[in-house]
Image (cartoon, grey):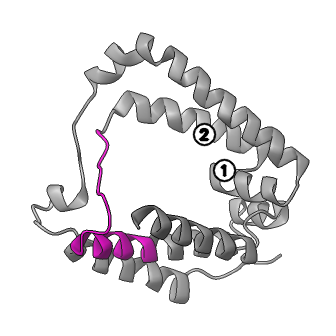
Amino acid sequence: MKLLLGLAIGTAIGAVMQLGGASSYRKILGSLLLKDMTIIKLILMTIAVTTVGIYALDLVDMANMSIKPTYVVGIIIAGLIFGVGFAISGYCPGTCVLASAEGKTDAVFTLIGGLFGAALYALVYPLMAPLISLTNYGEITLPSVFNVSNGIWIAVPFSAILLLLVFRVLKDRYE
């Protein structure tokens, strides 16, 4: 049941991304230049809805909250790889899959490159594990930082702030 629910939610998010133009180079570039806020709004709205949704599903035991440890070195390395890949291809992992499904050749090559990079990282991880584990700060979440027992109390105001940004603050700037 959980897998089918995950598939349905993932399909819905993919459909909204596609309808919102998240695979459009013009929209992505406009977002990066802070001229077209469509994709930024789409991302913030997705985060807002899924943040509340995942905690709500967790409350009724329909989600498996598995928090990964915070490895600072790993996060820095991954951020650099992500940034370079995004700068070269113009796609992030989600938009890359979306554009590949639409048949965009550049996105297909980006997807192949991303899979190759993930496989390469998996191969060199054993060599990097000692360095990465040196900066292991454990499972850090906002509820644990604020000493709140149930994350929904953080998720709802956080999501409300994001939705306020989406509907009231962020405006498109065309020149």
Q: Is residue 149 left or right of residue 122?
A: left
Is 51 magenta? The answer is: yes
User: Would you name the residue on which mark 2 appears?
Assistant: 82
Q: Which residues are magenta?
A: 48-69
Give whichever of 56, 139 is nearer the camera. 56
Asked whether the beta carbons under mark 2 and mark 1 sit within 8 Å of each other, the answer is: yes
Identity of the amino acid at label 2?
Phe
Residue 59 picture location, percent across and down: 22, 73
Identity of the amino acid at label 1?
Cys
Residue 113 picture location, percent across and down: 73, 33
Secondary structure, mark 2, is helix
The quarter holding residue 150 reads: bottom left
Mark 1 is surrounded, within 10 Å at the Cα level, by few (under 14), some (14 to 19) or many (20 or more) other residues, namely many
Residue sitting at x 80%, y 53%: 100
User: Would you name the residue on which mark 1 appears?
Assistant: 92
Residue 159 picture location, percent across and down: 38, 77
